[in-house]
Amino acid sequence: MMPHQLNWQEICQMIPKRKADAQKGDFGRLLCITGSRNMPGACLLSTQAALRGGAGLVTVATAPENPMRLAAAAPEAMWLPLETDEAGFLRSSDQNRKTLEKQLSRANAVLLGCGLGVTEETRRLVHWVLEQAVCPVVLDADGLNCAVSCIELSRRTGKDWILTPHPGEMARLTGHSIPQIQENRVETATQFAAAYPVTLALKGAGTLVAQRSRLAQNPTGNPGMSRGGSGDVLAGLIAAFAAQGIPSWEAACAGVYLHGLAGDAAAAALSQQAMLPRDLLAYLPQVLVKLEQER
């Protein structure tokens, strides 16, 4: 299958205009289960991206150290400390599940994984969240790594998952090597999306978005985005769109395209060598201004 090339005009149609009498509840509740004691940066970048992406209410469930560290950088979010083990990774405890149950029942989307870490406890927590969630779930980074053992759950439940793996994570999901993934990106994406009822965004040069019999390729972005943290920004942006009720296919396509455009703007101003993932957040508003003006 030859992928369809995403373009600016169709992306503009995927993000609805805001009504003049809109209020925060119209733009969804996003629950982010992200971060650990030693990986607060992924938590912060994904949270800031979700806020920039327009989610109405963002709640971040994370390690208890992170609210004090990060709230000043994202004061618009609500922070929910969870229990951790001795190493600072979230526990799959009764108390954590009780805390998350209420949030999951109200959420319009869940972001699961950025900076979470991979332990037996986080694996069990990810599995439990995937069973409990009744809204779209964006699985990124360690959320994907933890979900390898329970990916078959998607077939049983048919729930709405958006997966955002880089080639290494895709290799773990499929059992193939990274060279095999990279040499057969189109085939890998189409076969995986045919096998599982998910929306897949296979990251890399020319990110592929696959869902059932649909396949699209993203033309935006540049090598300056190839560093840790860029994927956290993308995951937060896609999750924000999903929380606003944008269907998973459109949320993933718009997310990768606009994320790449922000990266191109950052590279033009700062160079591919010097740009940082946080700069994507700084240039995302000018991309969205253009989108709002041209719709």
Image: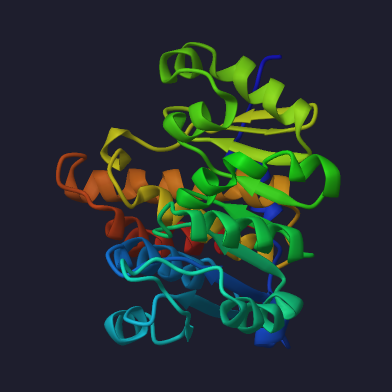
Q: Nearer the viewer, residue 110 or 224?
A: 110
Name the colour scheme. rainbow
Q: Where does residue 221 sit, x and y in percent of width and height?
A: 39, 38
Q: Residue at x 63, y 76 (%)?
A: 97
Q: Residue at x 50, y 26 (%)?
A: 171
Q: State whether residue 164 is above or below residue 67.
A: above
Q: Residue at x 42, y 55 (%)?
A: 232
Quarter in which the N terminus is drawn: top right
Q: State whether residue 92 is above or below residue 186.
A: below
Quarter in which the C terminus is drawn: bottom right
Q: Nearer the viewer, residue 26 or 12?
A: 26
Instruction: Look at the image and tell me whether residue 148 can be seen.
Output: yes
Instruction: Look at the image and tell me whether residue 54 can be seen.
Output: no
Q: Nearer the viewer, residue 26 or 135?
A: 135
Left or right side of 245 for 59: left
Left or right side of 179 for 135: right
In this rendering, the count of numbered labels is: 0
Q: Where does residue 233 sit, x and y in percent of width and height?
A: 42, 56
Q: Where does residue 89 sit, x and y in percent of width and height?
A: 39, 66
Q: Nearer the viewer, residue 76 or 109?
A: 109
Q: Where does residue 293 sit, x and y in percent of width and height?
A: 56, 62
Q: State whether residue 232 is above or below residue 271.
A: below
Left or right side of 93 for 279: left
